[in-house]
Amino acid sequence: MEPLIALKIAHVLATVLLLGSALGLTAWVLRARKAGDAAVYGRLLARPLVFVWLLMGLCLLSMPFTGWWLVHLVGWPLGQTWVLGSSLLYTVGALAWFWLVARLNRLRVSPGAGKPGFTLALALFSGLCFIAIAGLMGAKPV
């Protein structure tokens, strides 16, 4: 298999796994909240769900490397607006994701330690950043 095709597959797979895992966690939280489970935030970092969080973290770590390598192989200049914009969105979205994990861990340790509304806003902001990145990657406005 050619390196370019393999990199495209790895990059798209990381994106799909990241967004799919986030969507799965969102569905799980909404279903638990609808059932009246107030301690749902305390169980978000429980042992079975750690795999999902680790998978999301691995995808987040692999995306800049595969993305840079793709840009390098194709020969696009790094100064293109869509590349710079997606890099900026990635940085802000990844920092929001890491902050979200820290907040959820704090809510797990001491359930009354934070406001769930801000945690939800952080999750939505991070998710919107990665959806916008996927849109930029799909459109590739040159």
Image: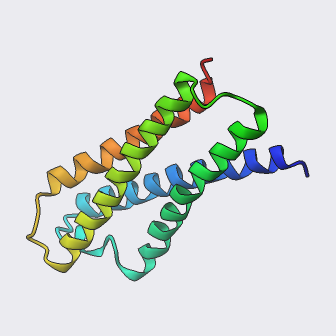
Query: In the orientation shown, which residue stands out farthest toward the left?
Result: 112
Which residue appears at 44% of the width and 67% of the height?
Answer: 53
Residue 73 sits above or below residue 13 on the image: above
Q: Residue at x 17, y 51 (%)?
A: 118
From where the camera sits, is residue 40 visible? no
Most extreme residue toward the right, as rendered? 1
The picture places residue 54, in percent across and down from the top left corner, at 49, 70
**For the point 31% across and 42% down, which residue is it?**
125
Q: Against 46, is 19 above or below?
A: above
Q: Is residue 105 left or right of residue 131?
A: left
Image quadrant in which you'd find residue 89: top left
Give the quadrant of residue 67. Answer: top right
Left or right of residue 6, residue 124 in this image: left
Q: Position of 27 compared to 142: left or right?
A: left
Q: Judge from the rendering whether residue 141 lies leftward or rightward of residue 92; answer left or right.
A: right
Q: Position of residue 9 (x, y in %)?
A: 74, 48
- Outermost bottom residue: 47
Whether residue 18 can be seen here: yes
Location of the C terminus by quadrant is top right
- Counting the numbered discs, the total is 0
Is 102 located above or below residue 140 in the figure? below
Expressed as whole percent of the image width and height from the top left, the position of residue 141 reads 60, 18
Residue lying at 29% horizontally and 58% vertically, measured from the top left: 100
Coloring scheme used: rainbow
Percent x, y of residue 109: 19, 79
